Image: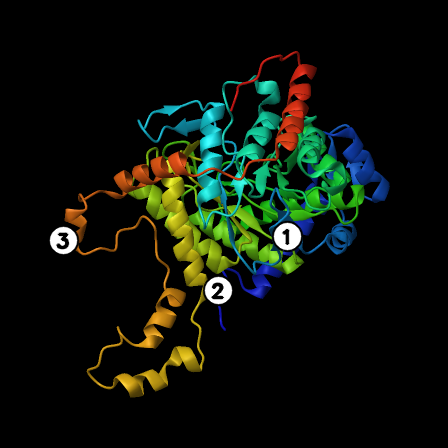
Amino acid sequence: MARPRLEVLSREEVEKIHVASLNVLSRVGVRIDHENALKLLNSVGAEVDFNKRIAKIPENLVREAIAKAPKVVKLCSRDGKLCYELSEGRNTYFDVGSAAYYYIDWRTDEVRRPLSKDLADVAKVTDYLSNTHIMSTALVPADVPDVIADRWRMYVVAKYTTKPIDTGAFTVEGIPDAAKIMASVIGEENVSKRPFMFFAVCPSPPLKWSYLTMQNLIDCAKLGLPAHIIPMPQTGGTAPATIAGSVVQANAEFLSGLVVAQFVNPGAPIIYSGSPTVFEQRFATSCTGSIEVQLISSAISQMAKFYGFPSASYTIVSDSKVFDEQASLESAIGAIISVLAGLDIAIGSGMLYEENAISLLKLVVDDDVAGMALRFGRGIDVDVDTLAEKVFEEVGPGGLFLKHKHTRVWWRKEHFMPRLLDKRSADMWRKMGGKSLKVVAKEYVEEILKKHQPEPLPQDVEKELRKTVTEIAKRYGIEKLPEV
């Protein structure tokens, strides 16, 4: 069965971007504020200026790293019952936007700093949604000290969903501690075999790695934990104004991280990810819902396939400041393009405000949007049954298909049924209260939070998990943590 696909680059253009990226890496280089990473690169053949902290990476190292890296990455659920195999966009999985500094209260529309309970609510709602496959550590809670906020988020989310978790560390200790947190749940021996967390590492555009992010990447590689390297080109700001130039930069940054990871630990699982933005020069804003973001994300998907890696990108984020028409339309465009472009992970469900806020109302509507996009991506099944020639003979001209057995068999198979988008007649809609999508979404969120109980951790496992995060907190002199 043919699947609808979108390509924004020809094969020749992909190869040109690849060559340009290699030229950037070998002639311009990348700045890496990490002495050991520079020493590593120097030892395997890169030209390193230790004073300027610039490493010029030759083509042969890139080729070797590409060959060493696995082409399939597994993301598992907390209980190990479910594993997604990421491989060249065979399936697209939708993922909640991560690390938002603000929360849009679904009851009041207030934009405020989130609390741990808000993060637990996002995890519970995500746990329930059928088309949102991955939960992230979506919010940065304000009711714990910043120094442990990264690991506290992991604890809260691990407790309230079984789904794979997209996360990241704000600290040097973050990745090793994340491994301890996972070990509390699945045992130390399973942490690298079936990790239920994967980790974002973001180079600082243009062409720079901070000490913290590089250490996080090295720790992921050493521990065998999946990392998604997320270049963040900002057209006209921290990247060239051109789409092609921004893709070259993103690709060079990804390849530089790939080289380090594969020379630290050959076979370390890596996802080629991205979070492109448009620098809106009229307002000095960094926009994530612009159509050019979708072009760059589609190109990232193609470059990942060129090398054989799984891909991901922030594609379903809106720049709207409230849950409104703009929030839905920008996400809908991003969702359909994600599926057509063959991204393995489409990131950003529930996210607004230039990647700075999470809205539960947007999250539940995004789940419907994801369902529609996935249905479109399935394409058209064409065989003897679906062509329905025999049915035409039985129904005949002027007949009605409604009562035919073929309709009963195929209608549900062929059609996606949204939970929130209204498909009633106008009269039925009025009789049901004539509610707007926002009102319907609000009622749905309330119902989920009232009725859905995520599968709890076994009591002894939850006790061990709490003990682990408590010990991490005590390391920083923090004696009291919120109850969630």
- On the question of residue 312 being in view, the answer is yes
Quadrant of the rendered image containing residue 53: top right
- In the rendered structure, find residue 20 and report the number of the disc placed on it: 1
- Which residue is label 2 attached to? 5
Q: Nearer the viewer, residue 304 or 33?
A: 304
Between disc 3 and disc 2, whose residue precedes? Answer: 2
Kindly identify the residue that appears in the image at 59 percent across and 49 percent down.
248
Q: Secondary structure at mark 3?
A: helix
Kindly identify the residue that appears in the image at 51 percent across and 26 percent down.
140
Picture coordinates of residue 439, whole percent (x, y) = 26, 38
Between disc 3 and disc 1, whose residue precedes? Answer: 1
Which amino acid is tagged 3? Asp
Q: Residues within 10 Å of mark 1 (few under 14, many from 20)?
A: some
Q: Secondary structure at mark 1?
A: helix
- Which residue is label 3 attached to? 427
Kindly identify the residue that appears in the image at 55 percent across and 36 percent down.
456
